[in-house]
Amino acid sequence: MSASWDSPPGSPRRRADSIIEADVAVIGGGVIGHSIAWEAKRSGRTVVVIDDAPGSGASWAAAGMLAPVSELHYQEQDLLDFMLDASARWPAFAAGLTAASGADPGYITTPTLAVGADAADRRALMDLRAVQQANGLAVEPLTVRDARKREPLLSPGIACALDTPADHQVDPRLLVACLQTALAGDGAADKGGNNNGAGGQGTAAAGAVDGYAVLARAAGLVWQDGAVAGVRLAGGGTVLAAETVVANGLHAGALEALPADLRLPLRPVYGDILRLAVPRHLQPLVTSTVRGLVRGVPVYIVPRRDGTVVIGATQREDAPSATDAVSAGGVYQLLRDAQVLVPAVAELELLEATARARPGTPDNAPLLGRVPAAGGKGARDSGYIAGLIIASGFFRHGVLLAPAAAAVCRELLDGQMDARWAAFNPDRFSTSPGARLTTARLSHTPPTKETA
């Protein structure tokens, strides 16, 4: 009988019964997945990233604001600490990535301006500032005159402005491209999936595009002896790995053969985002990220080095006809409110309107860590299911948290666990731990009391 093949258009052909082996398999090709993969590769491990359309999900639409101060929300102290940890990692993360890829991820450290359009917006921003100060965060009021000296195209009619020096930005599209280049660096395979030994580091996964990319959708987990042993690919084929990281955002809960009773309650939160070209006579439109409130509604304007700006801030939990469907009302709202803060927005050229769904959780915090085993005893007596790490549900903070999430995953791979992030354990919404005993051979279903 002839062998069957399955592969996305433009990728090397893959046998439906093919096997790729790696130390670490990362499911999900967004900013989080690529960052975790790069950190694992830097530790000397062979890594693959499994995604049939890498970089095309929420990361493609993200504005890339690195804003632990501006993104502070009430009663999210654990998340604030994690965001501050991530923010502190960004300079070294960006520098290391630039060195590894030879490219610019668009990391910009210009302070952020928070702007209110009217008196009510001013009161709301000052109330938030009180909370920010209570958490030791620096936010300093500016006079409108001083704000307009910094950003001359700001409307003279704004009610207030505040300087937020710790909030920066990066370009997520450039970031993902840099991560992909860095992952393909040492020991990369050629486009046909053949290991060419470039770099001599032994970090390429044979059969993977560029030594790391598996251009397929993950269908489910593979189990062996009570541990996760890899990933079953949609359409056929298997990735065998000592460790599997589930980092595919909204799709994490849909994977087959997840541990029994593990609940990953991820909901889609849609956001519209616009990209506009700034005419030469208006460049730069703004030099800082401008985060505004206009009649209580948030809007942001983020400048890019290529002379474009990104405008966004909508959040909707409706049920659009498609996950990338753009809301006409959202586009109108963004352009209307951005013009209140920077009237010259009306003269820009609309290049792109994009929408994506971000993975939210009930408490808006990520699902990050290992999964506890039944009775506190895992396949290797660690108390956790061996071979499995969850890294999903990063909601609106995915780009900011990427370096910290990558560092946490590397520690877990090394057998370490930072107690500071225990609040993000991925089974916190599970009603009871499932029975996860042992099986003797590879299986596409998780072990249970009945099958053990």
Image (cartoon, grey):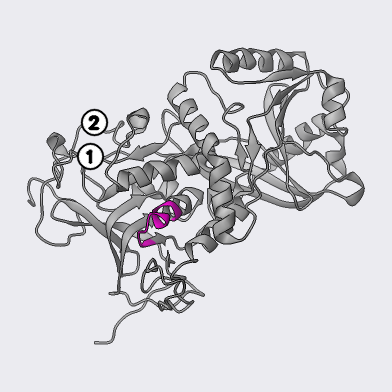
Question: Residue 32, position in %: x, y?
Answer: 47, 48
Question: Residue 432, position in %: x, y?
Answer: 20, 32
**Secondary structure under the numbered disc 1 in the rendered image:** loop
Q: Is residue 224 left or right of residue 323?
A: left
Q: Amino acid at mark 1?
A: Asp
Q: In the rendered structure, are the residues bearing label 2 and label 1 in contact, judged by CB atoms less than 8 Å apart?
A: yes
Can residue 46 be found in the magenta stretch? Answer: yes
Is residue 170 something one can see in this rendering? Answer: yes
Tell me how far mark 2 sits from mark 1, CA to CA. 7 Å
Is residue 325 something one can see in this rendering? Answer: no
Q: Which mark is residue 13?
A: none
Q: Quick one: label 2 or label 1, which is nearer the N terminus?
A: 1
Can residue 333 be found in the magenta stretch? Answer: no
Q: Amino acid at mark 2?
A: Thr
* Residue count near mark 1 (Cα–Cα under 10 Å), binned few <14, some 14–19, many ≥20: some
Q: Residue at x 32, y 37 (%)?
A: 426
Task: Find residue 134 and report its image quarter.
Answer: top right
Q: Which residue is identified by label 1?
A: 261
Q: Is residue 134 above or below residue 388?
A: above
Task: Find residue 314 and report its image quarter.
Answer: top right
Q: Is residue 354 left or right of residue 420?
A: right
Q: Residue at x 41, y 79 (%)?
A: 194
Q: Which mark is residue 431?
A: 2
**Secondary structure under the numbered disc 2 in the rendered image:** loop
Q: Is residue 331 left or right of residue 48?
A: right
Which residues lie in the magenta part? 38-47
